[in-house]
């Protein structure tokens, strides 16, 4: 006997067991969220340095982090 499933039954089955792709996406999103939170903390640090060299290094670090985050945003929005 063939059992016909309703759309609700099929949907419930699909969302009940995450696929490998979904698990990969979820694990990547957790890693990226952690990275972004860490970088926000770095960028929020009010200490820029006590010398011109330290301030320049801080500016370069901020630019590198900003470029990395922007590249990730562009990658996600594709």
Image (tube, rainbow, N blue to C red):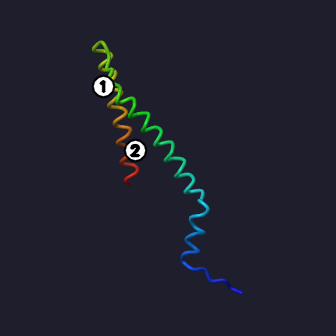
Q: Return the x and y of residue 44 as percentages of the image width and height.
A: 34, 30
Q: Secondary structure at mark 2?
A: helix
Residue 44 numbered mark, or none: none
Q: Is residue 77 above or below residue 34?
A: below
> In this view, which residue lies farthest toward the left?
52
Q: Residue at x 36, y 48 (%)?
A: 74
> In this view, which residue lies farthest toward the bottom?
1
Q: Return the x and y of residue 50 as percentages of the image width and height.
A: 30, 13
Q: Residue at x 40, y 31 (%)?
A: 41
Residue 59 numbered mark, or none: 1
Q: Residue at x 48, y 39 (%)?
A: 34
Q: Is residue 41 above or below residue 31?
A: above
Image quadrant where residue 63 sits:
top left
Q: Return the x and y of residue 3 as percentages of the image width and height.
A: 66, 83
Of the 4 image quadrants, the one containing the N terminus is: bottom right
Question: Mark 1 or mark 2: which comes first in sequence?
Answer: 1
Residue 72 numbered mark, or none: 2
The residue carrying pointer 2 sits among few (fewer than 14), some (14 to 19) or many (20 or more) residues within 10 Å by Cα, namely: few
> In this view, which residue lies farthest toward the right?
1
Q: Residue at x 53, y 51 (%)?
A: 26
Image quadrant where residue 59 sits:
top left
Q: Secondary structure at mark 1?
A: helix
Of the 4 image quadrants, the one containing the C terminus is: bottom left
Q: Return the x and y of residue 4 as percentages of the image width and height.
A: 62, 83
Q: Is residue 57 above or below residue 9?
A: above
Q: Is residue 45 above or below residue 70?
A: above
């Amino acid at each position: 006997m063939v059992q016909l499933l309703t759309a609700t039954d099929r949907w419930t089955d699909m969302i009940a067991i995450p696929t490998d792709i979904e698990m990969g996406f979820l694990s990547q999103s957790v890693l990226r969220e952690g990275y972004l939170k860490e970088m926000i903390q770095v960028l929020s640090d009010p200490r820029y340095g006590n010398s011109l060299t330290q301030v320049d290094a801080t500016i370069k670090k901020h630019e590198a982090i900003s470029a990395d985050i922007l590249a990730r945003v562009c990658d996600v929005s594709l």
